[in-house]
Amino acid sequence: MKTRVILELGTGNDLHGSNYTTAALRAVQDALHHSSLSFVRSLKIDKTKLEVDVTIGVQQPDKVDIEKVKASLPIGRVTVKAVKGGLDVPDPENNDPAVIASAAIAVRIDVQ
């Protein structure tokens, strides 16, 4: 069984265009920029053995391009799922809602 060694959180948005994938990608990048997995180099861990589980929360999960989000992660065996969450902020005067996404990135490794 793998042990979670890091959990990083991020938020992203698409202020104009209502693009859930754009918001999700920005949330992932926000989370990644809060972390440095220096232990991977220090402990000489094989990057291909890292399990990276990404959960994206948006109001319309089916509108997230999971493969694009997956491709944005630099290392590990990546899985991505989109779930109901995040926030849509209406702009009725301009019919231009802002989309806000949340991302949780968990990294797991074998700990002996």
Image (spheres, rainbow, N blue to C red):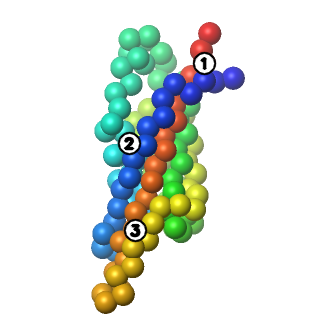
Please give left or right for residue 63 compared with residue 19 in the image. Answer: right
Q: Secondary structure at mark 2?
A: helix
- Label located before the other in sequence (1 or 2): 2
- Label located before the other in sequence (2 or 3): 2
Marker count (numbered) = 3
Q: Which residue does the image show at 51% across and 31% down from the upper left?
A: 107
- Image spot of residue 61 (x, y percent): 55, 63
Q: Which residue is mark 3?
A: 99
Q: Which residue is mark 2?
A: 31
Q: Which residue does the image show at 60% across and 24% down from the upper left?
A: 3
Dot 2, how many residues are within 10 Å of its Cα: few (below 14), some (14-19), or many (20+)? Answer: many
Q: Quadrant of residue 20?
A: bottom left
**Looking at the image, can residue 64 be seen?**
no
Q: Nearer the viewer, residue 24 or 59?
A: 59
Amino acid carrying mark 2 in the image: Ala
Front label number (1 vs 2): 2
Q: Which residue does the image show at 36% across and 72% down from the upper left?
A: 98
Please give left or right for residue 3 compared with residue 16 in the image. Answer: right
CB atoms at circles 3 and 1 under 8 Å apart?
no
Q: Nearer the viewer, residue 7 or 41?
A: 7
Dot 1, how many residues are within 10 Å of its Cα: few (below 14), some (14-19), or many (20+)? Answer: few
Amino acid carrying mark 3 in the image: Val
Q: Which residue is mark 1?
A: 110
Amino acid carrying mark 1 in the image: Asp
